[in-house]
Image (cartoon, coloured by chain):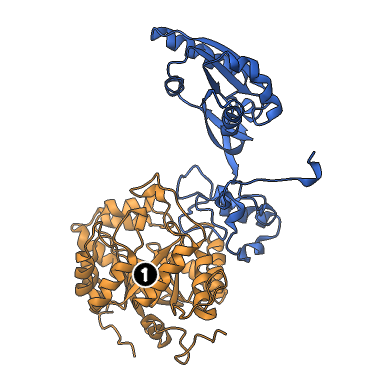
Amino acid sequence: MSEPAKQDGEFTTESKLERLFARGEFVVTSEIGPQKGASAESVIHHTEQSKAYCDGFNITDNQSAVVRLSSIAAAVHIMRHGGNPVIQMTCRDRNRIAIQSDLLGAYSLGVRDVLCLSGDHQSFGNHPTARNVFDIDSIQLIALVKMMRDERRLLCGDELKTEPRFYIGAVESPTGDPVELRVMRLAKKVRAGAQFIQTQAVFDVEKFAAWMDLVRNSGLDQRVNIMAGVIPVKSVRALRYMKDNVAGISVPDELVDRMANAENPQEEGKTIAVELIAQLRRIAGVKGIHIMPVGWEDVLPEIVTRAGLQLRPVAD
Amino acid sequence: MIVAEQKPLAEIAENIMEAQKVLVVGCGGCVTVCLSGGQKEVDILATSLRILRKKEGKPIDTATETLERQCDKEYVDKLAEKIQAADCVVSLACGVGVQYLSERYPDKCVVPAQNTKFIGGTTEHGVWEERCGLCGECILARTGGICPIIRCSKSILNGPCGGSQDGKCEVNPDVPCAWTLIYEKLKRQGREDAIYEVFPVKDWSKSRDGGPRKYVREDVLL
């Protein structure tokens, strides 16, 4: 018979993030997109450079459907170099057999946090003619991870000798329309077992705050730790690209104008990121920040420092 | 209906190789409705092949026939005589019709003239859209009559995904997000709380993933 998975008092897992949230710390995570190649050099570089400035590194799983070093392999490199990895697990490339196997493998290697998502459609990547999988969806994936952990069973019902005790994360797109559907979907993710949420990048703080009002009204902020997403941008071109092409991102015109008129766009981009963090931090229910530098990983220490978040807490 | 699109003439011509007597066979079913494989298209294709081959200095004879359906042995049998006289058969049916002809007349080379695309309907003259994913387990009663298996690019049962924006799919802004459509339909019917239902993982064994499917109705067997 399977036993309840909880062994450390109130904690469901050995996750550092879970402990920090439980202590009421304002959690900072970052993101690393592994390189296109059979080397972990850039992952290791960013880990060494930024590990003191964030509580976890989210590692993309073939982001934008572009083949890169695997998320789980990168996680091992991050751990070897003193960082705390959060693997991404997408539904695009694996059926339920591969997903469960990879989750068991990742846990056995020391990974304790997993972010569950559908994954960008393959038509955006470097293999647009690939056959996709999407055997299960992201909500079913969340429920699956919880089932493996709390019921110590595989999806088919088979018992696991050792359960993977993952801290379960999910994503949400707060400015995607219709906004009430986004809140309903967040509720489904929480009900399925999501314990922390990393949101799509926020540029439109007003719109995000309106979404957070709905989230608080439904009590969801009490049931899940919400981290607001921030993308530092280098140029007005990058900002316009996100405004026009990246789903779920809303960019106010005044922000575009500000970047367009900036003497030093890179500096302005950093300043905007720092300001956004300060604004998002003040919104009730926001428990942390998830910084996605998307190719500008070197900027992380400076942004975290300027945001006054450089002294990262130590987990017990 | 099954929606099919005719292959380029050059590809069909290449596939009939050196044949001199070509039988072009249409189908009176779906491909007639979607204007790609009925009698009219048979005549045009036969004429086009003759002109092309004449220009190449390798003239051919063509014969034509349009069966009621090519996915039914009873009709396929009727071709016996005409096929006998042909070196090669070009079928304008869907992939099922091509295989039925090929199975019934194993000594003849049967060339497909169509790319069979999907199950869909006409939205306006000349426009067809996919509506069914042939998954073998219909959930339309619970999704406001909109199929997320085929109309969501990721076949998400608990959507929408994070890529949906302004009610459009991340794959193509001309494609509506199936889950936004489902939500709007359920809301219109006062059933939007149904969105909270978590659909369990799907049994894909009832779909193509279970291997080629067969359906037997004992009650109508002869």
User: In the image, residue B118 lies at what x, y percent?
Assistant: 56, 38
Q: Image height check: is A14 above or below B137? A: below
Q: Can residue A59 be seen? A: no
Chain B as rendered: colour: blue
Q: Image height check: is A140 above or below B19? A: below
Q: Residue at x 29, y 61 (%)?
A: A69
Label 1 sits on residue: A87
Picture quadrant where residue A52 is located: bottom left
Q: Residue at x 48, y 12 (%)?
A: B20
Q: Residue at x 35, y 58 (%)?
A: A63
Q: Can residue B54 be seen? A: yes
Chain letter corresponding to the colour orange: A
Q: Residues within 10 Å of mark 1 (few under 14, many from 20)?
A: many
Q: Is residue A149 left or right of residue B31?
A: left
- The total of numbered circles placed on residues is 1
User: In the image, residue B192 lies at what x, y percent?
Assistant: 65, 61
Looking at the figure, which quarter contains the C terminus of chain A?
A: bottom left
Q: Hey, which residue is sitting farthest bottom in the picture?
A: A9
Q: Residue at x 29, y 62 (%)?
A: A33
Q: Is residue A271 left or right of residue A114?
A: left
User: In the image, residue B165 lies at what x, y percent?
Assistant: 48, 53
**Element marked by disc 1:** strand
Which amino acid, mark 1? Answer: Ile
